[in-house]
Image: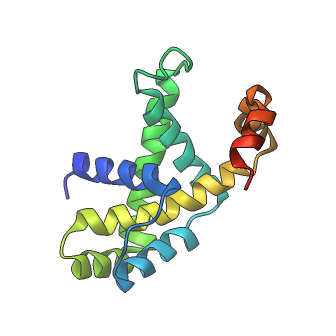
């Protein structure tokens, strides 16, 4: 699995973590659980930070987000260290078994990292400031119209 492919697979797996997790072999489920169990809160927040930098590169949000390129390089470096630790040390046997069961490293990585991404996203969502920001749009809702639209 080339480093470009691995990065793309990891990002797609983490980005899709908000949606339904794709069906996985039992070995990939074990691999995903290993990723969750062998990371701590700081590791998962690093994943969230890395995902944020990736999303910030999209043109639709570039006018709303300023990226400090020096922080991006630092985050990429730390992310590489984490991925290497997970795949070569902390969960190497589980990763190998998942790749063998899937028959291809891409789905094994994507599915397992989706599981980890879901946990990382949940941790970020627990922050009160994040919840306040997420709920900010609600002040602009027309509650009467919404109530009428949703009434049985």
Name of the residue lying farthest toward the front: 152
Q: Count of labels shown?
A: 0
Q: Residue drawn at (31%, 78%), measured in percent from left and top?
A: 98
Which corner quadrant of the image does residue 114 belong to? bottom left
What quarter of the picture does the N terminus occupy? bottom left
Q: Is residue 130 visible?
A: no
What quarter of the picture does the C terminus occupy? bottom right
Q: Residue drawn at (44%, 22%), measured in percent from left and top?
A: 60
Name of the residue lying farthest toward the top: 63
Whether residue 30 sits left or right of residue 41 in the image: it is left
Whether residue 91 sits left or right of residue 3 in the image: it is right
Q: How is the image coloured?
A: rainbow
Q: Is residue 117 visible?
A: yes
Whether residue 85 sits left or right of residue 138 in the image: it is left
Whether residue 28 sits left or right of residue 129 in the image: it is left
Q: Residue drawn at (49%, 23%), measured in percent from left and top?
A: 61
Q: Residue drawn at (39%, 56%), measured in percent from left and top?
A: 13
In the image, residue 29 above or below residue 58: below
Relative depth, front residue between 21 and 96: 21
In the image, residue 86 above or below residue 91: above
Give coordinates of residue 129: x percent, y percent.
78, 37
Give coordinates of residue 4: x percent, y percent.
24, 45
Relative depth, front residue between 77 and 20: 20
Name of the residue lying farthest toward the bottom: 26
Give coordinates of residue 16: x percent, y percent.
43, 53
Give coordinates of residue 42: x percent, y percent.
64, 53
């Amino acid at each position: 699995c080339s480093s470009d492919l691995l990065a793309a697979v990891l990002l797609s797996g983490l980005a899709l973590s908000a949606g339904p997790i794709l069906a996985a072999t039992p070995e990939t489920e074990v691999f995903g659980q290993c990723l969750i169990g062998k990371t701590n809160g700081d590791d998962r927040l690093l994943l969230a930070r890395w995902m944020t930098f990736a999303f910030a590169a999209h043109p639709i949000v570039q006018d709303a987000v300023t990226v400090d390129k020096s922080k991006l390089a630092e985050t990429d470096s730390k992310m590489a260290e984490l991925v290497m630790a997970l795949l070569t040390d902390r969960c190497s046997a589980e990763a190998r078994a998942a790749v063998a069961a899937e028959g291809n490293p891409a789905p094994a990585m994507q599915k397992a990292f989706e599981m980890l991404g879901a946990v990382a996203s949940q941790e970020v969502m627990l922050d009160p400031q994040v919840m306040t920001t997420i709920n900010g749009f609600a002040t602009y809702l027309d509650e009467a119209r919404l109530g009428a639209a949703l009434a049985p």
